[in-house]
């Protein structure tokens, strides 16, 4: 139901949406999140970002997050693509696509997946700046965002 990919090469979001919806007449909604590398983060002069991961473990964590989303909402499919390696500002870094019959389920599941991807998927980010390199720290705001989903199982909303 979910396609998971951790890869170095770029992806085409439009192509991925087409793959998700090809020959599907039951899809009424596709929600997406496309993340890009910024030129600022903890410091204002980010020149590049290097992402590392544990092959196999990372994909398993992403699959687990996707599986939890399918248990919470009536989803028809999805795709999670996360890049690793050296990326520069403006490069696409992550794509989450979720399809369902109704928009609210797609929106909620997409938000859920991103919140848990940020907190539970084993990725490590090193930012390269004019003043030196550093590993990016976990953010309290990401943990807070993920905690909202732990208060109770969301009920799917149909529109």
Image (cartoon, helix red, strand yellow):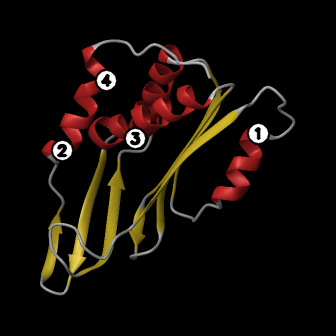
Q: Which residue is mark 2?
A: 141
Q: Are marks 4 and 3 in contact (CB under 8 Å)?
A: no
Disc 3 versus disc 2: distance between alpha carbons? 13 Å
Disc 1 versus disc 3: distance between alpha carbons? 20 Å
Q: Are marks 4 and 1 in contact (CB under 8 Å)?
A: no
Q: Foreground mark, 4 or 3?
A: 4
Which of 138/52 is in front? 138
Q: Is residue 5 visible?
A: no
- Can you say which quadrant of the picture contains the N terminus? top right
Q: Which residue is mark 1?
A: 21
The image shows residue 98 at horizontal and vertical percentages of: 59, 36
Q: Which residue is mark 3?
A: 114
Residue drawn at the location 15% of the way across and 67% of the way down: 42
Decide: few, some or many residues near mark 3? Use Cα within 10 Å; few <14, some 14-19, many ≥20. Answer: many
> Residue 149: which disc?
4
Which of 21/59 is in front? 21
Of labels 4 and 3, earlier in sequence is 3
Res 36 → quadrant: bottom left
Residue drawn at the location 27% of the way across and 38% of the way down: 119
Decide: few, some or many residues near mark 4? Use Cα within 10 Å; few <14, some 14-19, many ≥20. Answer: some
């Amino acid at each position: 139901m979910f396609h998971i990919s951790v890869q170095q090469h770029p992806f085409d979001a439009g192509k991925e949406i087409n793959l998700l919806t090809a020959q599907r007449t039951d899809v009424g909604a596709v929600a997406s999140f496309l993340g890009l590398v910024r030129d600022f983060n903890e410091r204002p002069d980010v020149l590049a970002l290097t992402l590392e991961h544990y092959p196999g473990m990372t994909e398993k964590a992403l699959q687990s997050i996707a599986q939890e989303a399918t248990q919470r909402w009536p989803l028809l499919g999805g795709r999670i693509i996360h890049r690793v390696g050296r990326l520069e500002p403006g490069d696409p870094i992550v794509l989450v696509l979720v399809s369902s019959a109704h928009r609210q389920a797609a929106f909620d599941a997409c938000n859920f997946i991103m919140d848990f991807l940020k907190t539970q998927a084993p990725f490590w980010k090193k930012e390269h700046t004019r003043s030196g390199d550093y590993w990016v720290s976990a953010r309290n705001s990401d943990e807070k965002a993920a905690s909202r989903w732990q208060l109770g199982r969301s009920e799917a909303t149909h529109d």
